[in-house]
């Protein structure tokens, strides 16, 4: 592929909190702005939402400020060491 036809060479501005990050009609996903500590809620709203604090319900690691959604579907702490 030439550089102009390769979608991986195009810079796209990250979506901000509340903006659409998952376009289901066109099956396009835009990364959420990591500096704002947001994640893309692909399972529900398709928009960037604030990351969740320890003890809040989650489905995936990227939803949590700690980047850890534990085995009880709760955001864990940075220092949590669970056995599995």
Image (tube, helix red, strand yellow):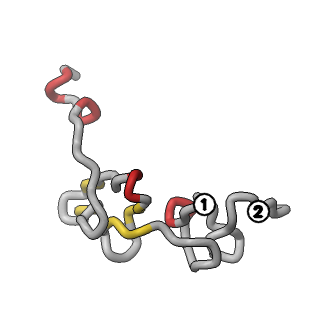
Distance (Cα) linking label 2 and label 1 = 10 Å
Using the image, determine if residue 29 lies above or below residue 59. above
Name the side, left or right, on which 23 lies relative to 32.
Answer: left
- Residue that sits furthest to the top in the current view: 2
Instruction: Indicate the quadrant where residue 61 lies.
Output: bottom right
- Based on the displayed image, in which of its 4 quarters is residue 23 positioned? bottom left
Indicate the position of residue 70 as horizontal and vertical percent values: 68, 68
Please provide percent x and percent y for residue 44. Answer: 37, 76
Residue at the right extreme of this rendering:
83
Q: Which mark is residue 2?
A: none
In the rendering, at what x and y percent does residue 39 appear? 41, 62
Which percent across, then down, holds residue 33?
A: 34, 53
State the residue at coordinates (52%, 71%): 52
Give the labeled residue for mark 1: 66
Q: How many marks?
A: 2
At 38% from the left edge and 58% from the top edge, which residue is drawn?
Answer: 36
Of residues 41 and 80, the one drawn nearer to the viewer in this rendering: 80
Label 2 belongs to which residue? Answer: 80
User: Which of the image's four quarters has the N terminus?
Assistant: top left
Q: Is residue 23 placed above or below 6 in the rendered structure?
A: below
Is mark 2 in CB contact (under 8 Å) with mark 1? Answer: yes
Name which residue lies at 24% across and 65% down: 19
Q: Earlier in the sequence, mark 2 or mark 1?
A: 1
Assign a secondary structure to mark 2.
loop
| Crowd class of label 2 (few under 14; some 14 to 19; many from 20; radius 10 Å) | few
**Residue drawn at (70%, 76%) of the image:** 72
Q: Is residue 31 above or below residue 47?
A: above
């Amino acid at each position: 592929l030439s550089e102009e036809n390769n979608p991986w060479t195009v810079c796209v501005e990250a979506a901000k909190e509340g903006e659409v990050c998952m376009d289901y009609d066109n099956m396009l996903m835009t990364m959420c702005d990591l500096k704002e500590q947001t994640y893309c809620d692909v399972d529900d709203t398709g928009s960037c939402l604030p990351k969740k604090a320890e003890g809040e319900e989650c489905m995936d690691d990227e939803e949590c400020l700690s980047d850890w959604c534990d085995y009880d579907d709760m955001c864990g702490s940075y220092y949590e060491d669970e056995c599995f």
